[in-house]
Amino acid sequence: MPAATDASAGALFLHPYATISVKYHVPIELELHSANYGKWSTFFKAMCGKFGLLHHINGSVPPSRTDPAWEQVDCCVRTWLYGSVSQDVLDFTMAEDQTARELWVAISNKFQVNQAPRAIFLSKDFHSMTQGDLSVMEFGKKMKLAADALREVGHPVAEPTLLLNLLRGIHPKFSNTKDITLDEALNQFALKELRLANEAKVLSSSALVASSTGCGSSCRSSSTASQQQQP
């Protein structure tokens, strides 16, 4: 075999970063009409920090596009971005010959524009939530996600406000809880929910037993009347 030239050796070199799966480190996909930007960006920054590549997205080090080694690593980071956001996000943020930093900024700007109008709609949804047919924990999760969405647009929800909103929207049968935290309220509500479900199951089983044996109130009335007619 002839010895490989420097050019061919460089063409065949696969950078270790190119073999890393972004899905393993960023387990959620950033979507255009969702409230997961904060969570997604936290995952992605942690991934870049883990490999010492934060400077490729935070701009702390100037780009060095004339350096093939820098360019190769930047392509890897850019590919991670491509693989962790939806196509709708890329339609608005992807451009030709971008650096990873430029793509990161474009994505960030897309999710941080028009925050005031979004906050109005999100706040309305948050304050009009009711439990409905949801379980206690499902309702708590829905409210927490709504609070996360408000935090994304610069309107964080304080713990007392979360609790008051939970008490306002919870089913009336749970609403006798006061002076506790959100987590404590959810735990108490969940326990009461289980107890009520168990009581309903016991009543249903008792009714089924009575029906199968034929001994309801009518049976008892007939038996009493029969005994009274005997000499």
Image: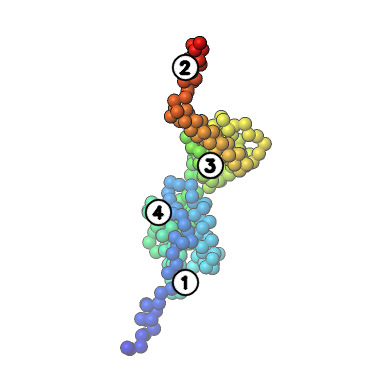
Q: Are marks 2 and 3 in contact (CB under 8 Å)?
A: no
The residue singled out by tag 3 in the image is 137
Marks 4 and 3, how far apart at CA: 29 Å
Dot in front, 1 or 4 = 4
Q: In percent of the image, x 50 and y 38: which residue is there?
A: 135
Dot in front, 2 or 3 = 2
Dot in front, 4 or 2 = 2
The amino acid sitting under disc 2 is Ser
Q: Which residue lies furthest to the bottom in this view?
A: 2
- Residue 54 at x, y = what percent? 53, 64
Disc nearer the start of the sequence (1/4): 1
The amino acid sitting under disc 1 is Trp
Marks 3 and 1, how far apart at CA: 48 Å
Residues packed near mark 2 inside 10 Å, few (<14), some (14 to 19) or many (20 plus): few
Marks 1 and 2, how far apart at CA: 94 Å
Disc nearer the start of the sequence (3/1): 1
Residues packed near mark 3 inside 10 Å, few (<14), some (14 to 19) or many (20 plus): some
- Tag 3 secondary structure: helix
Dot in front, 1 or 2 = 2
Dot in front, 4 or 3 = 3
Marks 1 and 4, how far apart at CA: 26 Å
- Residue 164 at x, y = what percent? 60, 35
Q: Residue 70 carries which label?
A: 1
Q: Do the residues labelled 1 and 4 touch (CB within 8 Å)?
A: no
Left or right: 231 as drawn, with respect to 88: right
User: Is 170 placed above or below 101 here?
Assistant: above
Q: In percent of the image, x 43 and y 46: which residue is there?
A: 33
The residue singled out by tag 2 in the image is 222
- Residue 100 at x, y = what percent? 46, 63
Q: Do the residues labelled 1 and 2 touch (CB within 8 Å)?
A: no
Q: Are marks 4 and 2 in contact (CB under 8 Å)?
A: no
